[in-house]
Amino acid sequence: MKMSLISLGLMAGMTGVGCAGLDETEAVPPSVATDATAQAPQGLVTQVTGTSPVSFVAFSSTETKPYNQSTTSVLAYTRDSTTGAFTAYPGSGAADGTISVPNVPSGRIYLKLGSRYLVSTDRTFDLGSTKWGRDGTFVSVPTPVTVSATGLSPWQSGDFLDMYSLNTGTYGYADSNATTGRPLSGATSLSGLTFDYATMRNPVLLDTSLGDKLSLAQMRWQTTANGVPYRAMHKVMLADVTQVAGQPVTVNGTFTQPSATGTFSVDWRRSAFDALHTQVNPDAVSTYNEIWMSARPAAVGSALSALSGPPLLVTLNPDAQKTDLVTGPMAYNNPLPSTWQKMAFAIAGFTKDYALGSAAPYSMNVEIRVEQEASAFTAAPVEPLIGPVQSPQVNTRGAFQNLTGVGTDASLRWSKPLIGTATNYVVNIYRLGTSNGATTATNVAVLHTDLQSVYLPPDVLQAGQTYFAEIQSWYQPGSNLATSPFKRALPRARASVLTGTFSP
């Protein structure tokens, strides 16, 4: 079965008791939610359980299978708020997708699944997810696809080829990944354009007998009546393809123009996104702004899928400026089913550099992101729905500075965002290293919580190592990432904060 979104990273187990940490009430800003009593065991022994159904949404059918949890490291930690000590309760996962941890005292737990921690007082967890595309086998070795096709509209600088398969959920940019045959300006055909299918996202082997088709879409550079440039779905080539991993295939076809059309317009407040860059981190740099508009099966549009982009109907990133834009109507041709849900994404990117010693810096990329039905983008200005958290701390010290001596049992705390209402928070812990003279970053832990603080369980931080954290504020009404970490609903949004470095 192809890897689901609940692939849980590092599988090394953690047992034993950690060192004492800070008391919940120590130096916490008044706006920070804490839960001292829930951390302490109350004497009632319970069982922690979870299920992991994965729904594969193909072009014309949906299939649900369990995600195999038999190799997942499963533990539940409780933390004594008086001593700060963590106690581990071992559990297990099964091939049928269930997880179980027996004999866990009541109170708040840190449910460890691989390198992911769900911080909650609940005892039942939904670890299911929804993916676009049928269950299948990923390509793991170079598998060339060579395309020759007629019917292109004269190729322009700024055009690109969007490759996708609606049945497998595969997608990618064919011409930018091509080794040969990229179209030249004015070309009306493809002659031997070759790309490696294994470099596409979600590269499930195509099989015509299962209803798979390969599509190439010419995304054409256009300009609105307001003078705003954009790219839109223009012509599409559709082909039956069956692949064998590692073996090349040749595809011949013709680009045709879909008969269905549409328009999409936005009032894009780019300045509102850019204004938050110092909240991401005082040293963060605003790097890019994009809007995508697409369509997908309703079952995918209302849940987390492997895709967050193609097949694109409209993509908007006209320049490197951060000024506001009122686009006017952006016209597109639509080869996708009319019943599919149209969705839009607005993304603002930010980077901060981290360096160990004299090694070349590592650029960490994060986003402020808004995802809604496309009609919501047209109906109101597009601006952040949630802002970054405020006043991040490691223990009781401001986290934007570089810190040492934080201990292996450190806590992270923050205040609520100034924009929007966060429904959950997700904390990513990265360990810095070096390789070939360059700084590297490895994600060693992910913590989901509905509080404004987390304590780092045993073995997340190691003496002699250097770390930084990304704290994400999430806006997703009606869902709880601490108990259902892979469930999604619209609207949804998130914003990130990057800390400075810290070491035990």
Image (cartoon, grey):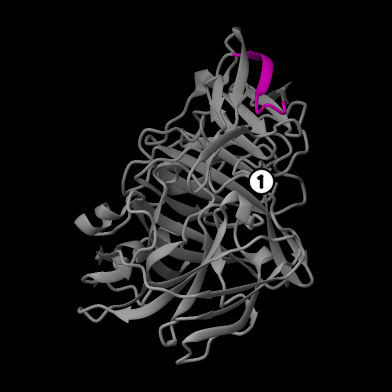
Looking at the image, which residue is at 55% across and 30% down? Answer: 119
The local secondary structure at tag 1 comes to: loop
Along the line of sight, the residue nearer the viewer: 54 or 434: 54
Looking at the image, which residue is at 70% across and 46% down? Answer: 504
Along the line of sight, the residue nearer the viewer: 287 or 43: 287
**Residue at mark 1:** 3
Which residues lie in the magenta part?
94-105
Residue 450 lies, in percent from the top left, at: 46, 33
Residue 465 in view, yes or no: yes
Residue 319 in view, yes or no: no
Q: Is residue 170 above or below residue 474?
A: below
In the image, taking residue 267 as reference, residue 295 lies left or right, namely right
Q: Is residue 98 magenta?
A: yes
What residue type is disc 1 on?
Met
Quadrant housing residue 379? bottom left
In the displayed image of the protein, which residue is found farthest to the top?
Answer: 44
Residue 32 lies, in percent from the top left, at: 42, 35
Q: Is residue 178 above or below residue 198?
A: below
